[in-house]
Amino acid sequence: MDVACDSGYNITHIETDLGLMIAAASAEGICMFEFADYKLLELELRQLAVSFKAPLVQGDNPHFDTLKKQLEEYFKGQRRDFDIPLHLVGTEFQKQVWLSLLQIPYACTTTYAEQAARLGRPSAVRAVANANGKNKISIILPCHRVIGADGKLTGYGGGIWRKKKLLEFEKTCFAAS
């Protein structure tokens, strides 16, 4: 039986079409959604606990129900954009970069350079790439849509194979609509 923590910082496991994922949420919204096999998962969980000054406890959170519903719709090809509340934990620059990911249209890709230019920081390509690498909310903040300048798939915390699957899935659903 799940018991909600008084602090309101909870984690849960969610099975997806791409494998088991771990979600974390506060009263404000989803603050982490990572693949369970992500090599930096434990570090991210510790960082969240430090940021919140409270432990993340296995438990229920109303945002988890919304997340599960929207993920189910996404993987059925019925949802292109997520509108679940988010609780971004990072620097102001990281938050700007992560929110800019929401501007990348479904089934489309962009490069780190194009993302940096859209942010008004064309010389900050490496900083943008680094911030994308610290995105704690996979799929919802679609960093899988950012590729290398040469058109190749580059770093993705869930693994390049998952990035490829997500992009192929979106292109297939887009073409079918």
Image (tube, rainbow, N blue to C red):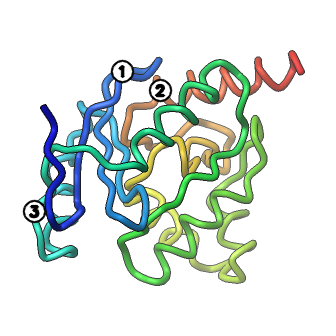
Quadrant placement of the C terminus: top right
Kindly identify which residue carries mark 1: 19
Give coordinates of residue 49: x percent, y percent: 15, 66
Residue behind mark 2: 162
Q: Which residue is depicted at the point 29% across and 51% down?
A: 24
Secondary structure category for the residue under label 3: loop
Image quarter of the N terminus: top left
**Comes first in the chain, label 1 or label 3:** 1
> Mark 3 = which residue?
55
Lower sequence index among marks 3 and 2:
3
Residue 55 in the image, given as x and y percentages of width and height? 10, 62
Separation of residues labelled 1 and 3 (CA atoms): 25 Å
Secondary structure of the residue carrying tag 1 is strand
* Residue ID at (44%, 39%): 65
| Secondary element at image label 2 | helix
The residue drawn where x is 67% and y is 44% is: 150
Where does the image place residue 15, in percent across and percent down from the top left?
36, 22
Badge 1 local density, few (<14 within 10 Å), some, or many (20+)? few
Q: CA distance from mark 3 to mark 2?
A: 29 Å
Amino acid marked by disc 3: Pro
Residues tagged 1 and 3 counted as in contact (Cβ below 8 A): no
Q: Is residue 21 above or below residue 136?
A: above
